[in-house]
């Protein structure tokens, strides 16, 4: 009897110590959050080449697996050659694809920028002349403009002295830092390509080690559940990102063909902007359409109007036909949660968060859904499972 009482008190004391320790740790992390984020940022900066390599290896893994399977059929007697050959072919094909896209897009984008620079002064002069003609026909508007312009010029001069000049000095002073950062990013990318080759070479070993670690730490039931969720996350990210890239490429090509047929001077630049921003779910079309519309407004107001109508039609086509055909319902999220995930992760991680936010939230949503359904079964509330909004298999 006394032994059980001592064991009871020992468990209570141990629980109290654990609660106090966790509380102290929480408050320590809370009050030292800036230092922790700074240290984490420094570590991520050091590991940037490995992060680049991991992303490249993850994207190329499906292609590498397919090539290796084909090569093993073509070279049945060789056990070692298909693996390295598949890795080399995957990297070469990826680099050739990137180079081909750059050679195809950059010259056209450069021509568009040159045409814009040449045409912009004339467009500005035409706009100024139109405004002066309007003032000549409206004497009352002329009086108001004279008063407004004199006050605006005074404020503009003050703003230039107090804000623009110091800002320009800061920008010029930080130009060297920006150039250094750009060169450092190029270096990280090159190292990332090399590291991705090593990661692709040992990807199967990593998978076995991860499974051994998982089964060694967790019971069999939890290990199987975590492995299943990891496979679901891989399927979600790979399917969503690859499908979104293909969908955006198709949208960019359609936009380029349409704007070229209509004779837009900046057709290539507009197509690139529309295609790249289309990778961002929900807000992407709007983010791409606004700068392109403003650009066309300077070039030709009628082109701007036609482009806006075209973008609305194109996005309806993408949202109802092209996107569902390529992506299907890969995430299983309704429009509300898609919008929520984009705003949440976009606010946390910027543009990167807006791109990966939807599949990441879909994975978190799936984990929570499985836990809730498991709890309902454990508590005998199977009647609520019949009312669940989805029909996904557990």
Image: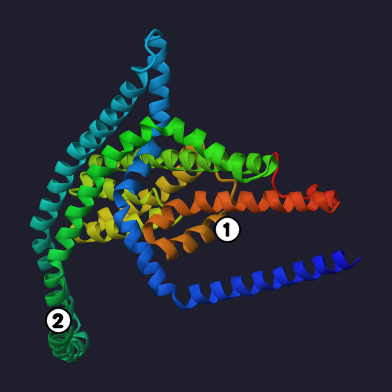
Can residue 328 be spotted in the picture?
no
Which residue does the numbered mark 1 point to in the structure image? Answer: 336
For the residue pair 105 and 136, the one nearer the viewer reads as 105
Tag on residue 166? 2
Residue 162 placement: quadrant? bottom left
Q: Position of residue 302 (x, y in %)?
A: 26, 56
- Image quadrant where one finds the C terminus: top right
Q: Position of residue 379 (x, y in %)?
A: 84, 54
Can residue 36 be spotted in the picture?
yes
For the residue pair 341 and 12, the one nearer the viewer reads as 12
Q: Residue furthest right?
A: 1
Q: Is residue 303 above or below residue 32?
A: above
Q: Residue at x 38, y 22 (%)?
A: 67
Mark 2 or mark 1, which is nearer the start of the sequence? 2
- Image quadrant where one finds the N terminus: bottom right
Q: Is residue 240 above or below residue 380?
A: above
Q: Position of residue 73 (x, y in %)?
A: 42, 11
Alpha carbons under labels 1 and 2: distance apart: 43 Å
């Amino acid at each position: 009897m006394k032994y059980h009482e001592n064991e009871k008190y020992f468990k209570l004391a141990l629980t109290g110590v654990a609660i106090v320790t966790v509380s102290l740790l929480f408050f320590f992390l809370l009050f030292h959050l800036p230092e922790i984020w700074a240290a984490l940022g420094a570590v991520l900066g050091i590991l940037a080449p490995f992060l680049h390599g991991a992303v490249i290896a993850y994207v190329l893994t499906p292609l590498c697996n397919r090539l290796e399977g084909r090569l093993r059929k073509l070279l049945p007697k060789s056990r070692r050659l298909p693996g390295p050959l598949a890795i080399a072919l995957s990297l070469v094909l990826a680099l050739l694809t990137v180079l081909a896209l750059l050679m195809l897009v950059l010259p056209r984008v450069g021509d568009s920028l040159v045409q814009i620079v040449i045409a912009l002064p004339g467009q500005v002069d035409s706009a100024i002349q139109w405004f002066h003609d309007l003032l000549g026909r409206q004497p009352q508007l002329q009086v108001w403009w004279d008063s407004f312009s004199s006050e605006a010029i005074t404020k503009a001069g003050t703003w230039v002295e107090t804000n623009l000049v110091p800002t320009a000095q800061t920008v010029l002073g930080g130009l060297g830092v920006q150039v250094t950062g750009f060169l450092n990013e190029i270096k990280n990318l090159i190292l990332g390509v090399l590291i991705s080759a090593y990661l692709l070479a040992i990807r199967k070993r990593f998978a076995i080690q991860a499974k051994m670690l998982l089964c060694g730490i967790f019971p069999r039931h939890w290990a199987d559940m975590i492995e299943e969720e990891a496979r679901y996350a891989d399927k979600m990210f790979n399917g969503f990102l690859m499908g979104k890239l293909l969908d955006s490429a198709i949208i960019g090509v359609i936009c380029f063909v349409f704007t070229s047929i209509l004779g837009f001077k900046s057709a290539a630049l507009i197509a690139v902007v529309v295609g790249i921003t289309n990778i961002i779910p929900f807000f992407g079309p709007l983010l791409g359409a606004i700068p392109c519309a403003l650009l066309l407004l300077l070039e030709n107001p009628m082109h701007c109007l036609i482009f806006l109508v075209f973008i609305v039609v194109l996005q309806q086509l993408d949202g109802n036909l092209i996107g569902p055909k390529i992506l299907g319902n890969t995430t299983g999220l309704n429009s509300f949660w898609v919008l929520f995930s984009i705003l949440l992760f976009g606010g946390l991680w910027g543009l990167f968060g807006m791109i990966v936010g939807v599949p990441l939230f879909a994975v978190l949503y799936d984990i929570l859904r499985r836990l809730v359904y498991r709890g309902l079964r454990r508590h005998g509330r199977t009647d609520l499972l019949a009312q669940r909004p989805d029909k996904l298999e557990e």
